[in-house]
Image (cartoon, rainbow, N blue to C red):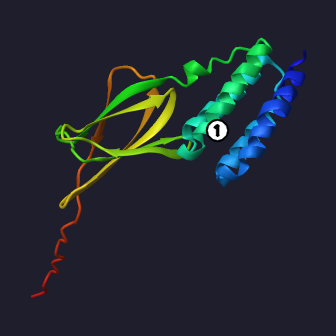
């Protein structure tokens, strides 16, 4: 069977019915991403291109809101089964494997920062939010991919923010984020005018 026939068969039997059935559950941006994925998949002319494009579905699944994850995972299972029947291995289990990641937040004087706000972004969307514990740490499970992590603190006298990139799987067990502390209110320095004598 030709590559184009495999793609068309997938669209007709799995992807397009799934997309139309769940269309109203998706926000505008996710709809646009799913249509873009479909258009790119139509243009595939090799097994490698199919595999590369299918990775987009996994990225969209990871960054999708919780209320659509269940219908998404069902479609991913059917997608893997369909391509396997057509002798194309996708290995979603590897792509969807989660890795335990510990983030530790310290200030620029090497002190741990408790109650720092952590926001994890993936594929341009916020996927997780939490605060560090007494020891400045937070542990979460993340799929393979590149993430942007915002760490911020706001105390009575201080504020701070740091943004870092995190690649999963990563080297080492902990990701250290240093937040540089800044005074919340700048002291106004008086302007002294020279008096003429």
Residue at 71 percent of width and 46 percent of height: 22
- In which quadrant of the rendered view does residue 1 lie? top right
Q: Is residue 170 visible?
A: yes
1 w.r.t. 153: above or below: above
Q: Position of residue 51 (x, y in %)?
A: 71, 21
Residue that sits furthest to the left in the current view: 197
Residue that sits furthest to the top in the current view: 87
Residue at 41 percent of width and 30 percent of height: 141
- In which quadrant of the rendered view does residue 177 lie? top left
Q: Position of residue 116 (x, y in %)?
A: 27, 47
83 or 137, which lies in front? 83
26 or 122, which lies in front? 26
Q: Which residue is mark 1?
A: 71
186 w.r.t. 87: above or below: below
The C terminus lies in which quarter of the figure? bottom left
114 w.r.t. 14: above or below: below
Q: Is residue 76 left or right of residue 103?
A: right
Q: Is residue 168 left or right of residue 65?
A: left
Residue at 66 percent of width and 25 percent of height: 77
């Amino acid at each position: 069977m030709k590559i184009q026939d495999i793609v068309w068969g997938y669209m007709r039997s799995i992807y397009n019915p799934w997309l139309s059935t769940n269309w109203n559950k998706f926000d505008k941006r996710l709809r646009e991403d799913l249509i873009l994925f479909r258009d790119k998949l139509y243009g595939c002319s090799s097994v490698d291109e199919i595999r590369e494009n299918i990775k987009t579905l996994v990225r969209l699944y990871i960054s999708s809101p919780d209320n659509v994850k269940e219908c998404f995972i069902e479609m991913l299972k059917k997608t893997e089964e369909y391509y396997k029947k057509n002798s194309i291995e996708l290995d979603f289990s590897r792509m969807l494997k989660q890795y335990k990641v510990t983030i530790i937040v310290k200030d620029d004087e090497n002190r741990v920062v408790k109650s720092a706000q952590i926001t994890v972004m993936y594929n341009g969307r916020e996927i997780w939010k939490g605060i560090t514990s007494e020891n400045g740490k937070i542990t979460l499970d993340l799929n393979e991919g590149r993430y942007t992590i915002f760490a911020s603190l706001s105390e009575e006298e201080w504020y701070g923010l740091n943004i870092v990139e995190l690649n999963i799987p990563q080297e080492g067990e902990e990701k250290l984020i240093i937040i540089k502390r800044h005074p919340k209110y700048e002291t106004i320095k008086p302007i002294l005018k020279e008096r003429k004598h």
